[in-house]
Amino acid sequence: EAGVTQSPTHLIKTRGQQVTLRCSPISGHTSVYWYQQALGLGLQFLLWYDEGEERNRGNFPPRFSGRQFPNYSSELNVNALELEDSALYLCASSYWTGWENGYTFGSGTRLTVV
Amino acid sequence: GEDVEQSLFLSVREGDSSVINCTYTDSSSTYLYWYKQEPGAGLQLLTYIFSNMDMKQDQRLTVLLNKKDKHLSLRIADTQTGDSAIYFCAESKYGGSQGNLIFGKGTKLSVKP
């Protein structure tokens, strides 16, 4: 069974630019979660999508947005990049009811903003 | 407190036991989790415990849960150099209704040969 896949694995952007990160969940998982892991800050919850709808978002500005497609894959968009957006962006997926299994994480996209 | 708290560093000798502690925030958290992150990788679920349990053992891993004190611990027996990683505890806050696991900042475990 393929795991959660994220692309690209690394990218470098200039301050002010826009970026799109992609995530494909495990087959059958309908919920997708995005987390930001910045140095020293642990994992900060960004967004939760389930069945194509945004269900919850963390304490991030509106320039962080995303969507979930009918095949349950997801995109995370970040506009007007700032230096402090440099981080590892992790996507995870789960069955909505599968809480005992927690989330399955991808390997992340390392974003560097210069 | 508002945050899931963990100590940031732990250093042990190979063959010793490691104990990583965590304090969580929400007494209604249904499940509590331990994840492992190796360098350059995503998070891997190690184990979980349901909130009505006190203890769970899984090979070298033992999880203890004290609901009264909202304290969770992970014991790794016979720690190996391959166990060197960052360990995160996480809670399904609000019973999971908000759809997000709340993570601690992680404990970096260093295993010396």
Image: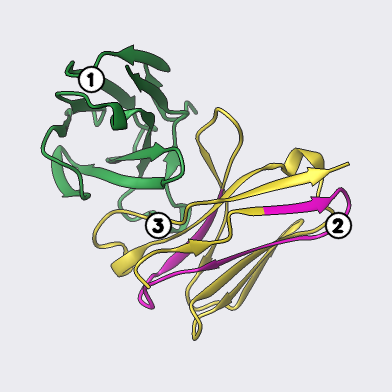
Mark 1 residue element? strand
Of the two numbered discs 1 and 3 on the same chain, state the one appearing first in sequence.
Answer: 1
**Does mark 1 fall on the same chain as mark 2?**
no
- Crowd band around label 3 with a 10 angstrom C-alpha radius: few (<14), some (14–19), many (20+): many
Is residue B31 found inside the magenta-colored segment of the image? yes
Question: Is B45 left, or right, of A9 in this rendering?
Answer: right
Question: Is B38 left, or right, of B28 in this rendering?
Answer: right
**Disc 3 marks which amino acid?**
Trp
Mark 2 residue element? loop
Question: Which residue position holds label 1?
Answer: A20
Question: Which residue position holds label 3?
Answer: A99
Display colour for chain A: green
Is residue B4 found inside the magenta-colored segment of the image? no
User: Residue at the location (46% across, 44% down)?
Assistant: A40
**Disc 2 marks which amino acid?**
Asp
Where residue B31 sits, quadrant-wise, is bottom left
User: Residue at the location (28% across, 22% down)?
Assistant: A21
Q: Nearer the viewer, mark 3 or mark 2?
A: 2
As drawn, B109 above or below A5: below
Residue A9 picture location, percent across and down = 42, 17
Residue B20 picture location, percent across and down = 65, 61
